[in-house]
Image (cartoon, grey):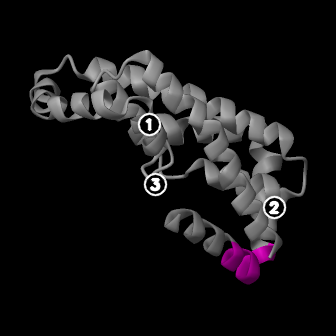
Amino acid sequence: MLSLGALFGLIALAAHLARDQLDALGRGFVQRFGLAGMFVGTYLADAFSFPIPPQFYMLTAISSGGSQVAPMVVISVASLLAGYTGYRLANHLTRFRIFAARLERTRPRIDRLFERYGYWAIAIGSVSPVPFSMLCYLSGLYRIPPRYFFTLVLFRVPRLLIFYALIRLGWAQ
């Protein structure tokens, strides 16, 4: 809740202090890169922990003044594909001895977590402030069963919609 409140506060403050500059940034980004830029940016952020998060692209869509339906669909699809990419990539990393040895030491704790809480472990993780890309990588590294990973992915779209609503609300302040 703290991170969501911080996001809202930062957007409201940015809208208050730099609305004209952010409007120009949003319009410029959308005109120059469009939906493809939002897709690539979100994919890089959620597959490889690129430093510009999907919330930036949400803000550019909102500040550009255009429709937000297509950008939200593009951002959501890119995020889901990126999560799957991170999961598969991390799964392959476990073949390297340096990763495998470290994972085996902590694996019993992860296994107990899923034995005890099952899907609730994923649900709680998906609403935590841990970035989606990191959750996907951890899922792949620990070889979380696909049914649990699918649950994590299902929680991603509502989380994106909550971020969008907070950004939109902060922008309207």
Which comes sooner in the sequence, label 1 or label 3? 1
Q: Residues within 10 Å of mark 1 (few under 14, many from 20)?
A: some
**Residue 120: assigned label:** 1
Q: Which structural element holds mark 2? A: helix
Q: Quadrant of residue 149?
A: top left
Q: Quadrant of residue 119?
A: top left
Residue name at image x 83 percent, y 71 percent: 172
Could you say where residue 137 lies in the image, as x and y percent from the top left?
A: 37, 33
Q: Which structural element holds mark 3? A: loop
Q: Is residue 133 above or below residue 80?
A: below
**Residue 63: assigned label:** 2
Q: Amino acid at mark 1?
A: Trp
Instruction: Name the foreground residue: 104 vs 110.
Output: 110
Could you say where residue 37 lies in the image, as x and y percent from the top left?
A: 69, 40
Can you tell which of label 1 and label 3 is closer to the viewer? 1
Would you say residue 46 is visible in this rendering?
yes
Which residues lie in the magenta part?
Answer: 12-20
Q: Amino acid at mark 3?
A: Pro
Picture mark count = 3
Q: Residues within 10 Å of mark 2 (few under 14, many from 20)?
A: many
